[in-house]
Amino acid sequence: MMRARWIPLVAVATMATVVIGASARAQDTTRGVRIGLGYAGTKPGVLVLAILGVGGDSARAIIERDLDYGDRVAVISNTNGTIGSNAGATVNYGLFAKLGAAAVVQCFLGPSTLHVIVHDVAQSRVAQARDFVVPATTNSPEWRMALHNASDEIERVITGVRGVSATRIAFVRDGQIYAIDQDGEGSRALTGPGLALSPAWHPTGRYVTYSISTPKGWDVMVKDLSTGTVRALVATPGGLNTTPLFSPDGNTIAYTHGLESGTDLYIAPAFSNEGARQITVGRGTDNTQPTYSPDGHRLAFTSGRSGHPEVYITDVDGTDAELLTPLDFEEQAYRCSPDWSPDGRVVAFQARVAGQFQVMTITLRDRVVKQLTSDGINTDPSWAPDARHLVFTSTRTGVEQLFVLDVESGRTRQLTHGNAARLAAWSRPLTRLP
């Protein structure tokens, strides 16, 4: 896809020394006002002014990148922060309107606070003025997360939809679970050496669950990222225990369990040692890879009960099971790895097409299937909280890496580099980094 055109502003840099002084800082009465312009399919232009102070250049770059990756606005290039802000001047709304800006973002970075002002250029007014608490250590994970949170609020003010910058993506690399910011920065290992698979986030972001290989089989683990403590889910000890997933309320974990012949879905309390409840009765077939509906009432999962893998849906008590994907009796028919979108409208999954897996979606209402990828082998989709972006594994660069896809525009960006990365899981919005 062709990306939004950058508008050069270097030539007018000396004309755009704009700022809000003390009087604008008092305009918090405008909080919550959205820039409600109708753009008829065209992304609104947004200019982020230079940010003065220690870490200002990094802060501006982070906010610009966050807004760009949100795919709802067109970021107007402020090359090297040339467009500045100096206290005491007046915002020249007419100039910015001519430059194509629907909104101008102005930030003041202090030792512990980021003061953000979003200007509605068309209305020549302040749409919002708000302070964000920022840790003192510049470029630390906590500092970056605070800026991501500010970016998401800026996007909400401009478009009416909160961004997903303050999120992280868990994935598997070299047998360990890693996490990375949605912009591809801040990668770190969450588990030690071993063989771990299938990470999933707790709704709060404080915990991750995953499966690990042990001498007795595969166990489901829950790690508290705040304390570093790890505990095993012992509801079904021994055998195969894999593909765990927290429920939307975070109180239970759905997972796959099997001993010798076939696997079934089970649900167990996430933070106690109470027994598990069996959900599916596969009778020797494999039933695996559960994903919750947003309300927590239903599960989509992969089952081989028809003779080959397809995606099914069931109530969480195991009743009313039904086939979701169109039943296909072709020799290579294979559909698996479902992920239910946060808005409840579609399920993403992978399907074999011409001998290679591709990422697909199917609508819940009318069962329309759409193919989203075609370059290389593409697997294991996971939705962002905005139900607009997907992260998935792809071989298009020659090595398995994670890519992010905007399903509305088709724009794709590479998230990870280096050693192979796969089995990604996108977190809900995080207010802080555990």
Image: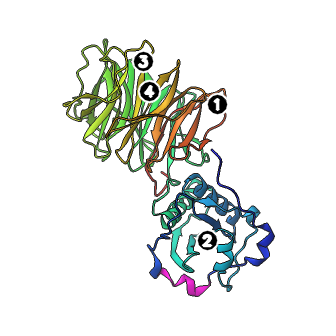
Sooner in the amino-acid sequence: mark 3 or mark 2 = 2
Q: Of tags 4 and 3, which is closer to the observer?
A: 3
Q: Which residue is mark 4?
A: 212
Residue 161 falls left or right of residue 307: right
Q: Say whether residue 24 is magenta.
A: yes
Q: Give the structural element (helix, strand or loop) at label 1.
A: loop
Residue interval drawn in magenta: 21-28
Q: Give the structural element (helix, strand or loop) at label 3.
A: loop
Q: Look at the numbered discs 4 and 3 and tell me whether their residues touch, using CB distance below 8 Å.
A: no
Q: Which residue is mark 3?
A: 333
Image spot of residue 82 (x, y percent): 76, 68
Image spot of residue 392 (x, y percent): 52, 35
Sooner in the amino-acid sequence: mark 2 or mark 4 = 2
Query: Which label was assigned to residue 419?
Result: 1
Determine the CA span between mark 3 and mark 1: 30 Å
Amino acid type at mark 3: Ala
Q: Residue at x 50, y 57 (%)?
A: 163
Sooner in the amino-acid sequence: mark 1 or mark 4 = 4
Q: Which residue is mark 2?
A: 104
Sooner in the amino-acid sequence: mark 3 or mark 1 = 3
Q: Residue at x 75, y 67 (%)?
A: 9
